[in-house]
Image (tube, rainbow, N blue to C red):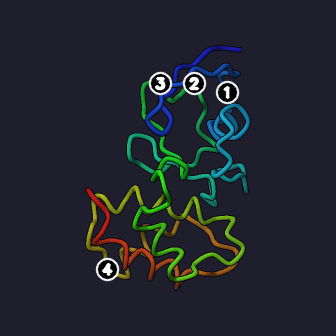
Amino acid sequence: MATYSLTVNGIRQTVEAEPDMPLLWVLRDVLGLTGTKYACGVGTCRACAVLIDGEAIASCVRTVASIGESAVLTIEGLSDSGDHPLQVFWQELNVPQCGFCQAGQIMHAAGWLKSNPNPSDEDIERMQSPNLCRCGTYPRIKEAIRKAAPHVEG
């Protein structure tokens, strides 16, 4: 076991973990932040997406030892009261069906919207393409992102 000092959701925390432990398990099992979901375990579905220094990554394949001084943002840290524009429009448009992939979908969009605040439908489809939704709510996901985009601060 090694000791790591991580900044998660703006809070500096010390954790003990094996160096090769995926960040996902540190978030869920060590820190109790269960909003980030485990699905494929190989980084292909992105249900486990979190932001590392503002960039969406698959936390199931990123080790805790690789985080260093980077800032980690999970769905729990996106907003204090669930009022981030993506969360608001996700609810308004009833985006989730089963809901399992939705935290990853939201976090992925939150990462890229800062650099593309006025995305076209094609931009949304391209940028969200790494995130899989087994329920097929892609049209509602696209609409929520389209509506939230003007309200996301860069």
Callout 3 amino acid: Gly
- Real-space Cα distance between discs 4 and 2? 37 Å
Q: Which residue is mark 3?
A: 68
Q: Secondary structure at mark 3?
A: loop
Q: Residue at x 40, y 67 (%)?
A: 85
Q: Amino acid at mark 2?
A: Ala
Mark 3, other Cα within 10 Å: few <14 / some 14–19 / many ≥20 = few
Q: Where does label 1 land, which residue? A: 20
Residue 107's mark? none
Q: Quadrant of residue 24?
A: top right
Q: Which residue is more in the foreground, 4 or 89?
A: 89
17 over 135 or under it: above or below: above
Left or right position of 29 against 89: right
Outermost residue, top direction?
A: 2
Q: Which residue is mark 4?
A: 120
CB atoms of marks 3 and 2 within 8 Å: no
Q: Would you say the residues marked 2 and 1 are in contact, meaning their CB atoms lie under 8 Å apart? A: yes
Q: Closer to the N terminus: mark 3 or mark 4?
A: 3
Residue 61 position within the rendered picture, expressed as x and y whole percent measured from the top left: 63, 42
Task: State the residue at coordinates (50%, 60%).
Answer: 82
According to the picture, the residue beneath numbered tag 2 turns out to be: 65
